[in-house]
Amino acid sequence: MISKRTLGRMALAATVAATLIACGKKEEAKPAAAAPTASELTIAYITNGNTNEGWTLINGGAKKAGSVPGVKFIELAAEKGELSKQLAIVEDMITRKVNAIAIAPVDSAGIAPAVTKALAAGIPVIAVDTGITGSNITSYVATDNIKAANVQGKWAAEQIQDGDTVIYVTGDLGQSTGQERKKGFVDALNEVRKNVRIVEVPTTWDQTMAQNGVESALRANPKAKVIACAWDGGALGAKAALMAAGKKPGAVKIAGFDGSPGGLDMMKDGWQQANAAQMLAKIGEVGVQTAIAAAKGEKVEARIDTGSFLVLPSNVDKFAADSGVGQFMKVKAK
């Protein structure tokens, strides 16, 4: 029988042995903490609500740029192109503390107060395709509209004689894009043809408005030689108006602006003779890329021109292939 004294000595010996073993054992290395990952950037892309072909390509370019790793891309649109809706969207993005905003404004001046508030909150703002007036934005990414419209106006001047009539279909003159395209066209046209008569068809980038307006303009001016349009939707409306008037392709020359699939299809079919083409997908892509760079604190250019090109029947197939627009065209290259 083991006594209590013996049990106590055995327990003490075990404790001492355990202590000696522990003291002689090397400490195992703990796994290293995972390196902290960079926080995801949230980029808001706010469109103006337009759904024409040109904007489909611009928005596609924006989505492509926003699909890179480390970026949460949010695309929102001003329903029916309403300024109040777009103002509310910008306010919401400020509240959500996004890292940058790329925006195609519904109204160049009307959006300025919300943009100024975003900038004051430390959120870079990039204007895409359409400029913003009344606020010192981070960058403006778009075609040089005046330069491209100058080319369109010069082409139109070469198709007519002094005293002839030209119909001009405007865009929304509440936006810098519409203002610049009209100015560029009219200035270049008047530089070559001093006494040309310009009949203006006002629209808000609405194709039906363009068609109805051109129909009225043709009735009042049946000898018009050229119809120039601020965007390709206007050119499509002009084509419909000419068809309604019983005109054949080329009877009245049409100059478009955008280089959209529908506009270039018109050219392939003989309805459009010139197009001041933008690099549409590039506008959206570079716009969002610039927003990402600004969100990272990188320096970006205040004005980025994405380029333009005068498309004619002689080079339409090459432009369609080079720009990527050809994949969306119905009338393919031969």
Image: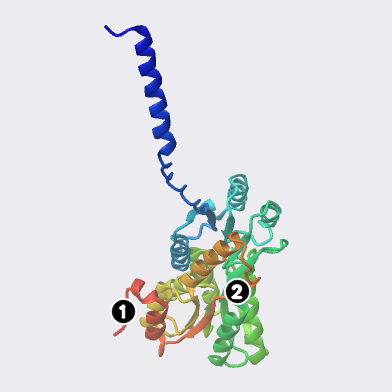
The structure residue drawn at horizontal position 53% and vertical position 63%, both measured from the top left corner, is 288
Instruction: Label 2, secondary structure: give it.
Output: strand
Residue for badge 1:
332
Q: Nearer the viewer, mark 2 or mark 1?
A: 2
Please indicate, yes or no, whether residue 131 appears anywhere in the rendered image: no
| Residue 185 visible within the image | yes
Relative to 7, say whether 123 is above or below. Answer: below
Nearest to the observer: residue 249 or residue 96: 96
Query: Where residue 198 sits in the image (x, y, percent)?
Result: 62, 80
Residue 303 x %, y %: 64, 73
Q: Residues within 10 Å of mark 2 (few under 14, many from 20)?
A: some
Name the residue tied to disc 2. 304
Task: Determine the residue positioned at 38% across, 16% down.
Answer: 9
* Foreground residue among 237 and 256: 256
The x, y position of residue 136, in whole percent, is 71, 63
Q: Nearer the viewer, residue 31 or 20?
A: 20
The percent coordinates of residue 102 (x first, y second) are: 57, 60
The amino acid at mark 1 is Lys
Compare marks 2 and 1 and give the one earlier in the sequence. Answer: 2
Residue furthest toward the left?
1
Q: Amino acid at mark 2?
A: Ile
Question: 76 left or right of 11?
Answer: right
